[in-house]
Amino acid sequence: MHIGLSNVSVEQLNAALEVAPIISVQNRMNVFDRSSTDVLHRCEKMGITFLSYSPLSGMGQAGRIGENRVLSRIANNHGVSPQQVALAWLLQRSPVILPIPGASKSRNIVDFAHSVKVTLTSHEMAELNAITD
């Protein structure tokens, strides 16, 4: 049996861990929404997979990523899309993060898959970490 949780706080995760082993947590996280950072840190400590939903800011908001100057500049430097940079940021942020972007077009799925090949510098990671909107 495998148990995963969704939309939990650290307190809820800790309570669940007292009852059964937890293998994954699915919470929202992206370059604009880091409200689950404390949950991510707990998952890192426990070796629990953190499934980042809405890694591109959610339905209808992915364009917002392309409008961000920092994301666009870094994407241009790497010859990739700003969306790929946003996914690469998540992947490089923690070894337990697995972004789960939704896609209705096969070309977007392929584009998103290529984000694993984007290697951001520590300076770029710091710039992306500093994005507030």
Image: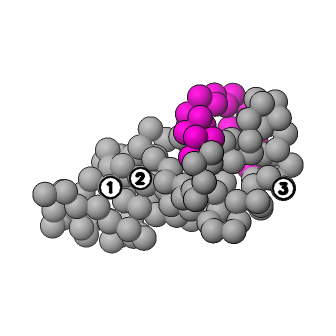
Instruction: Characterize the magenta stretch by its predominant secondary structure.
Output: helix
Q: Nearer the viewer, residue 15 or 27?
A: 27
Q: Which residue was labeled with disc 2?
A: 50
Q: Which residue was labeled with disc 1?
A: 24
Q: Is residue 26 visible?
A: yes
Is residue 101 left or right of 111 when viewed as pictured? left
The type of residue carrying mark 3 is Glu
What element does badge 3 sit on? helix
Asked if the residues shown at circle 2 and circle 3 are in contact, with their CB atoms under 8 angstroms apart, the answer is no
Is residue 12 left or right of 77 when viewed as pictured? left
The residue located at (63%, 28%) in the rendering is 119
Quadrant where the C terminus sits is: bottom right
- Magenta range is 109-130
The residue located at (43%, 54%) in the rendering is 51
Q: Is residue 43 above or below residue 5?
A: above
Residue 57 image-quadrant placement? bottom right
Please tell me whether residue 119 belongs to the stretch shown in magenta: yes
The type of residue carrying mark 1 is Ser
Q: Is residue 97 above or below residue 1?
A: above
